[in-house]
Amino acid sequence: MEERVTYNDDIVKGFVFSGIFWGMAALLVGILISYQLIDPKLNYSPYFTYGRLRPLHTNAALFGWGIGSFMGLFFYMTERLTRSPLWSPGLARLQLYLFNITIALAGISLLAGMNRSKEYAELEWPLAIMIVVVWVIFSVNVLMTIIRRREEQMYISLWYIIATLVGVAILYVVNNLEVPVSFTKSYSAFAGTNDANVQWWYGHNAVAMVLTTPPLAIFYYFLPKSTGTPIYSHRIGIIAFWSLVFMYLWTGAHHLLWTPVPDWVQTLAMAFSIMLIAPSWGAVFNGYLSMNGQWHQMRENYLVKFLIFGISFYGLQTLQGPAQAVRTFSGFIHYTDWVPGHVHNGAMGWVSLVVFAGIYFIIPRIYRTEIHSVRLANLHFWLAFTGQLIYSVSLWTAGVQQGWMLRATNPDGSLSHTFMETVAELYPYWHARAAGGLIYLAGFAIFVWNIVMTVRSSRRQQAAEAA
Ligand code: HEM
Ligand code: HEM
């Protein structure tokens, strides 16, 4: 007879609720910085200025909301896919405390103006060490659970989870090699173009290992769970997985096109970025083909809506990204608002939509109840969808306009516009971005309410059963 496994869901709850908390903080700061760009009077010096709040937004969004939720969902998936309890619940609890303390200290240090000036790697060395400790604890726990698994087959999501654990560890340690000069200041161990190269090797692989492999692990697990039918092809999933992790590592220099970085490095990055379309779309097609005969669920099942629109934004993102990596197109959109449009199509569309689906799926199951309101979940979907589209489309348009203005020349060959003139034209788009952000935030608030009410109704049911 098969042994019953007790899963440790308390830790899953801890991480998911932490993720939601940091997500709300990130969105609020996102709205504030959107308005600061429109009205500089909203900068409150020295702590609440754009320069300090922008990295606060990105860190809270990527590391608080993204990684916090991934940690919870990874624990949930790993236990079930291996049919094994977590290797060490004690370590996981320690990780939860350390994770939240680190994110809180990160926020405080950024507001205090401590910053290594490397995007997505802003935190000073004592915090970087704390992050390494959290990550090592996390990785050991998940890997040991996988090693001691009772299910021999390793489902595709586990491969994506392992890639995340190993990838983030390597990238983070290399890009954080630095020489401390005081407790709050350090200098990079690399210099000049080497430093830039290492930074964007890290930066783009953060896209790979934080904004691609974790949501793919979630997508591959929760799509079949939500539709009740298996994934179209495990084999396509595995082939796409290995080609994706191989190709991503060469693409970082597409952030440095037209710079003093050697030409061949730029061309290599360009070529690998274009090749990346294949494994990226391997996952998109796998998702779409898994919907064969199930498309009606797009109307009936809100989880499927989040997941399929999520993977569609991933598809869009992974066509747009390679296009941006081509020198000519890069020359047009780099230094314009096109780029934050690309970022948020991926962050608010792809990454957040699949995380919402994962959380909506697990919370009722962990609490042994139904979701409080399917109507509210649908409303959340539409607000997230429209808010994100308003955000991204307005910035893409802004980017095209700015790109043309920056290139326009007079008959004598001089530039027609100064950079400031191009920026002055962006106000309408920035208003639209802020409006899109507010709509997205409204959706997020409804999501939080729905989750809180689900938990409360489960507690009431349990109290009634106990009475
Ligand atoms: C085939 C896949 C992809 C390729 C080839 C790609 C390519 C690019 C390129 C070339 C840039 C630099 C734009 C510039 O500054 O000129 C960029 C920026 C960025 N992309 Fe993608 N992208 C891909 C997928 C994604 C995905 C799935 C996400 C998820 C959200 C994402 C998030 C970002 C972020 C956060 C940046 C901004 C980096 C910064 O701070 O400057 N990308 N991407
Ligand atoms: C209410 C929703 C949001 C609003 C209003 C918002 C607003 C902003 C603003 C104003 C910027 C600065 C853009 C610039 O420098 O020109 C920014 C950057 C960024 N945000 Fe958000 N954001 C939102 C949601 C998110 C989410 C959910 C994520 C990630 C999961 C995210 C990740 C980022 C990243 C990575 C950047 C850096 C982009 C770059 O360097 O090009 N944001 N955001």
Image (cartoon, rainbow, N blue to C red):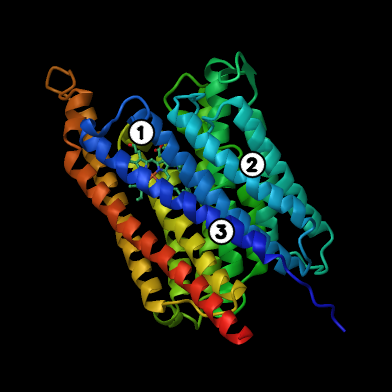
Q: Which residue is mark 3?
A: 16
Disc 1 residue lies near ligand 1 with CB under 8 A: yes
> How many marks overall?
3
Q: Which residue is mark 1?
A: 334
Disc 2 residue type (three-letter): Val
Q: From the image, state whether disc 1 or disc 2 is nearer to you.
A: 2
Q: Which residue is mark 2?
A: 168
Identify the image quadrant of the N terminus: bottom right
The answer to whether the residues at label 2 and label 3 have Cβ atoms under 8 Å apart is no
Identify the image quadrant of the C terminus: bottom right
Q: Tell me residue 223's x, y (percent).
A: 55, 71
Disc 3 residue type (three-letter): Val
SS class of the residue under badge 3?
helix
Viewer-proximal residue among 51 and 258: 51
Disc 1 residue type (three-letter): His
Q: Tell me residue 164's x, y (percent).
A: 65, 48
Q: Earlier in the sequence, mark 2 or mark 3?
A: 3
